[in-house]
Image (tube, coloured by chain):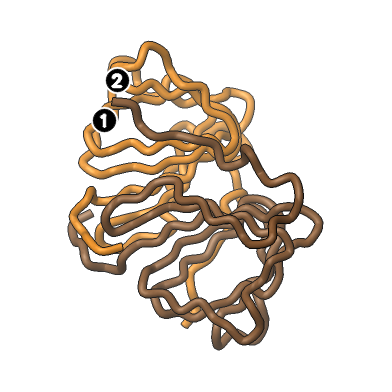
Chain colours: A orange, B brown
Amino acid sequence: MTPSAGNLFTNPPANPPADELFEVLTQRPGWKIERITSWGHATPQGEWFDQTTDEWVVLLAGAARLQIEGEPAPRELGAGDWVFLPARLRHRVEWTDETRPTIWLAFHIVPEVIKGL
Amino acid sequence: MTPSAGNLFTNPPANPPADELFEVLTQRPGWKIERITSWGHATPQGEWFDQTTDEWVVLLAGAARLQIEGEPAPRELGAGDWVFLPARLRHRVEWTDETRPTIWLAFHIVPEVIKGL
C-alpha cells in the first residue's frame, strides 16, 4: 500500500487569492487535517467561528492575530505557535499578514466520543 | 476558559539528547498530538513501529529518512513533508540529521471508530 503524503510548503499562491484557501490533506471518519492559506484575510467583522468539532491548529508561516471570546486582546501568532480550540469555543481571526502567505495546519476532530488511546 | 497553547520551535535541546524526546502537547480520549525531537536518532536496526493507531506525521525542521515496509527505498523527508501512516503499516526511521534537531509533529488517532465529521 502507498500511504498518502505531501508537503505543507509547496505550491503557495503567488499572489493573494480572493478567498482563503482550504485544502483537506487527509480525512477519515471523525477527523480531518487541512492546510489553510491566508494572505491578509480575516474573519468578517462581527462574525465568529463556533464549531461542533475540536480544533488543534498551528501557524507554520506568516503571522496572525487570533481573538478568543472572553480574552481581553487577540493573541499574536508567529511560526510554530499552536492553540487547542475545543468545540464551541468561539474565536475569530482578527488579522493575517498582508505581505506574505500565512500557512496554518488545522486538525478538526469530533470531540471526546472515542475512548482508549 | 483558557485554551492550551504553545510553540513548536521553542526550547529545542542545545545538544543531542541520549534519547529522542517525546512531548505530548494535547491529549483527549481517542487521540493525542506530540512533538518529537530527534538528533541523529534512528529506529534500532531490525525494529519496526507497528502501531494500533493511525499516525499523521509531519517533519517541520531537520531531515530524516523514513522506511515504509514494502517500499524499495526510504523516503527522504525535509521541512514540510508529511505522511499518513495507517495503523499497522510498519515503518522505521532509518536516519535523522546528526548536525541539528529534527522536529516532528505527530497525531496519533484511534482508527475509524467515530463517524460523522
Residue holding disc 2: A69
Q: Give the quarter of the image for residue B93.
A: bottom right
- Residue A67 higher or lower than A89, as above or below: above
* Residue that extends furthest to the front in the rendered view of this protein: B18
Q: Which one is in front, B72 or A40? A: B72
Q: Secondary structure at mark 1?
A: loop
Chain containing mark 2: A
Three-letter amino acid code of the residue under disc 2: Glu
Q: Position of residue B72 (x, y in %)?
A: 64, 87
- Mark 1 nearby-residue class (10 Å; few <14, some 14–19, many ≥20): many
Judged left or right of residue B117, residue B51 is: right
The earlier-in-sequence mark between 2 and 1 is: 2
Residue B113: tell me if it is visible. yes
Residue A37: tell me if it is visible. no
Which residue is located at x 55 percent, y 88 percent? Answer: B70
Residue holding disc 1: A89
- Residue B91 higher or lower than A62, as above or below: below
Q: Position of residue A35 (x, y in %)?
A: 47, 47
Q: Position of residue B86 (x, y in %)?
A: 41, 73
Quadrant (top left/top right/bottom left/bottom right) for the C terminus of chain A? bottom left
Which residue is located at x 58 percent, y 83 percent? Answer: B47
Mark 2 and 1 residues: CB-CB less than 8 Å, in contact? yes
Q: Position of residue A71 (x, y in %)?
A: 35, 16
Q: Give the quarter of the image for residue B89.
A: bottom left
Which residue is located at x 25 percent, y 64 percent? Answer: A116
Marks 2 and 1 belong to one chain: yes
Q: Which one is in front, B47 or A70? A: B47
- Residue A104 higher or lower than B93, as above or below: above
Judged left or right of residue A23, residue A116 is: left
